[in-house]
C-alpha cells in the first residue's frame, strides 16, 4: 500500500513537471527530460543508468521531493547500489520506489541489528571460504610434491 502511494506520488510529481508546474517551481528534472527524449510512453518504463541517476539526484526539484519524502542523500555517489539491487546497471521506477521506502526516516534500532547480523553471517561465510581455499591449496601442494618424488627417484 505504501509502495502504491509512493509510486502514485512519483507519477504525480513527474506529470506535474511536464508543463503544468507553477512559475516558482524548479524546472523539469533530468528523469523527465530523459523520459521525453527517449520516447517512453509510461513512467514505469523509465530506466536510468548510473550517470543519469546522479544527474537526476542533483536536480533541485528531485532534491525537494526527496526531502519531502524524508530521504537524506548525504553521499549520493555511494548510493547507486542501494537503488540498483539487482546490479543491472540501471535503476527502474520500481527499484527507485523500493529504495526510497527503505531509506525514509531515521534508521531504527532493528535496522542496525539486522545489518550487524548480516555482516556477521557474511564474515562467517568468508571464514568458510578461506578454510576451503587453504584446504585446496594444501591438496595441490601435496599432489605437486608427490609428482616431484615420482619423477626424480
Image: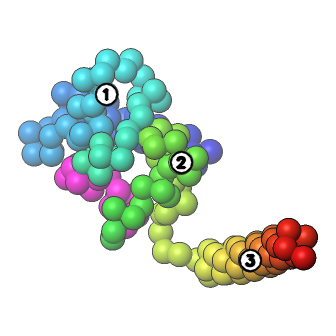
**Nearer to us: label 2 or label 1:** 2
Q: In terms of image quadrants, where is residue 108?
A: bottom right
Position above or below: 83 against 19: below
Q: Residue at x 32, y 18 (%)?
A: 39
Q: Secondary structure at mark 2?
A: loop
Quadrant of the snapshot with the C terminus? bottom right
Q: Residue 71 at x, y = what percent?
A: 40, 63
Mark 2 or 1, nearer chain start: 1
Farthest front residue?
A: 153
Please report contact status of discs 1 and 3: CB closer than 8 Å, yes or no: no
Reading the image, the residue beneath label 3 is 130
Q: Residue 20 at x, y = what percent?
A: 20, 29
Q: Secondary structure at mark 1?
A: helix
Q: Residue at x 55, y 60 (%)?
A: 102
Quadrant of the snapshot with the N terminus? top right
Reading the image, the residue beneath label 2 is 87
Q: Residue 127 at x, y = what percent?
A: 75, 80
66 magenta-colored: yes
The CA span between labels 1 and 3 is: 47 Å
Q: Residue at x 27, y 56 (%)?
A: 63
**Nearer to us: label 3 or label 2:** 3
Mark 3 or 2, nearer chain start: 2
The CA span between labels 2 and 1 is: 21 Å
Q: Residue at x 38, y 39 (%)?
A: 48
Give the residues drawn in magenta, as a range. Answer: 57-72
In the image, is 26 to the left or to the right of 99?
left
Q: Residues within 10 Å of mark 3 (few under 14, many from 20)?
A: few
Amino acid at each position: 500500500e505504501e509502495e502504491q502511494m509512493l509510486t502514485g506520488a512519483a507519477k504525480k510529481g513527474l506529470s506535474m513537471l511536464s508543463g503544468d508546474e507553477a512559475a516558482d517551481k524548479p524546472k523539469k528534472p533530468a528523469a523527465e527530460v530523459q523520459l521525453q527524449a527517449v520516447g517512453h510512453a509510461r513512467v514505469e518504463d523509465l530506466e536510468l543508468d548510473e550517470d543519469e541517476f546522479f544527474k537526476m539526484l542533483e536536480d533541485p526539484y528531485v532534491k525537494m521531493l526527496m526531502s519531502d519524502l524524508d530521504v537524506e542523500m548525504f553521499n549520493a555517489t555511494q548510493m547507486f547500489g542501494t537503488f540498483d539491487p539487482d546490479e543491472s546497471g540501471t535503476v527502474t521506477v520500481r527499484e527507485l520506489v523500493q529504495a526510497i521506502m527503505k531509506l525514509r526516516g531515521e534508521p531504527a534500532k532493528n535496522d542496525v541489528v539486522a545489518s550487524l547480523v548480516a555482516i556477521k553471517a557474511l564474515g562467517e561465510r568468508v571464514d568458510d571460504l578461506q578454510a576451503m581455499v587453504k584446504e585446496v591449496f594444501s591438496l595441490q601442494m601435496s599432489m605437486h610434491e608427490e609428482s616431484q618424488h615420482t619423477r626424480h627417484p
